[in-house]
Amino acid sequence: MLSALGLDTMAEAVYRAMLADPRGGVAALAARVGATEQQVRDGLDVLSELALVRPSADSGGLRAVSPDLGMEVLMARQQAQIAAQQQRLEASRAAAAQLISEYADLRPAGASPGVEQLIGLDQIRDRLARLTREVRHEVMTFAPGGPQTEENIAASRPLDAELLGRGVRTRVVYLDSVRHHRPTVEYARWTASLGGEVRTAASLATRLIIVDRSTAVIPVSSEDTAGGAVVLTGQGTLTALCALYESVWAAALPLGETPVRDVHGLTAQEAALISLLSEGHTDETIGKRLGVSTRTARRIASDLMERLGARSRFEAGVRAVQHGWLPAREG
């Protein structure tokens, strides 16, 4: 029951037994939980590592920390892990932005090995169609832009069914905002029923499709994804993009799970918004990055400023650093 907080079955059983019988030794605990003494000692090692048992001043042995304190310790530990994972994700996003910027100004005359430029929506669709026919193992996708249109959903269903029907693994990361859009949620659940995997993240650096870990397609401009794209096949580039994808995927939340707040009480979407706000982005740009309307972005920003007690966006950035919501800037 407490596995989500880092306790395995044996450690939890030993912890409960110690709470029920505070004076029981290893032998008594083993008898109570129906395990060997070595298994109990292993469980005690886990509990000691998690600070759920402490030396007893009375008996000289170990005593269980009370559940109200113990659960606070476990929750704080888990929140610290989430915060660290969020920092790693932000570092990966920065690396991705740098990588993508290297290709932002590509022109046909400047093409290089491992880079193919697509101009216009027709070329993009034709190239994606060929890649879809040729895929053998896996498709990994970042799908920013918020909720999917009914038209896009209807067009995607036959393709998804065909890919999943022949055993291709499909993974998609949407924005958290799709969780409030019933058609997109229903479509994601339908995909999952066929074996597809869907998660959500607060923000995504760009639209991205990786096929069989050997070919990637990204738009030249995130503001006009239909205007042009590049197809990347260089080994070094694909290694970096696959690492980025796995980092974002690990931090993203499965669609069936409820989003949690970090140690500062922020949702992932709020944390992403305050970061974008501190970088000077407009409400319109923030809305696009988070997949929400400009009005919603403005409302969330206002709520966060109120929580920070800030009267301006500049002051909000300063106070966010002071509160630990954002890392202090160097220089």
Image (spheres, rainbow, N blue to C red):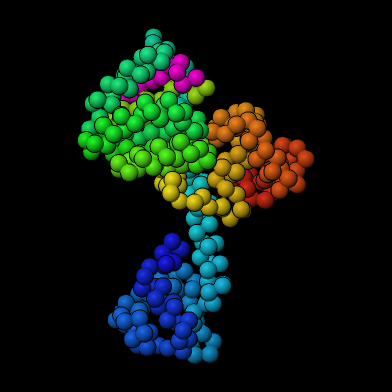
Residue 100: quadrant of the picture: top left
> Between residues 214 and 22, which one lies in front from this camera angle?
22
Q: Report whether 24 appears left or right of 284.
A: left
User: Height in image: 257 above or below 117?
Assistant: below
Query: In the image, what residue occupies the spot 71% across and 48% down?
Result: 307
Instruction: Spot the residue most to the right.
Output: 311
Q: Residue at x 37, y 88 (%)?
A: 28
Q: Residue at x 56, y 72 (%)?
A: 69
Instruction: Please state if 273 lies on the left or on the right of 246 as rendered.
Output: right
Horizontal and vertical percent position of residue 234: 31, 26
Residue beneath the point at 40% across and 30% down: 153
Q: Quadrant of the N terminus?
A: bottom left
Nearer to me, 293 or 316: 293
Q: Quadrant of residue 301?
A: top right
- Residue 15, given in percent of the width and then of the height, sits at 44, 77
Instruction: Read off the magenta span.
Output: 224-235
Classify 127 as above or below 90.
above
| Left or right of 142 in this view: 77 | right
* Position of residue 133 measured from the top left corner of the image (x, y, whole percent): 24, 25
- Number of numbered discs: 0
The quadrant of the rendering that contains the C terminus is top right
Q: Position of residue 32 (x, y in %)?
A: 36, 85
Outermost residue, top direction? Answer: 109
Report whether residue 306 is seen.
yes
Within the image, what quadrant is residue 184 found in? top left
Q: Nearer the viewer, residue 289 or 279?
A: 289
Let me know if residue 67 is in the magenta part: no
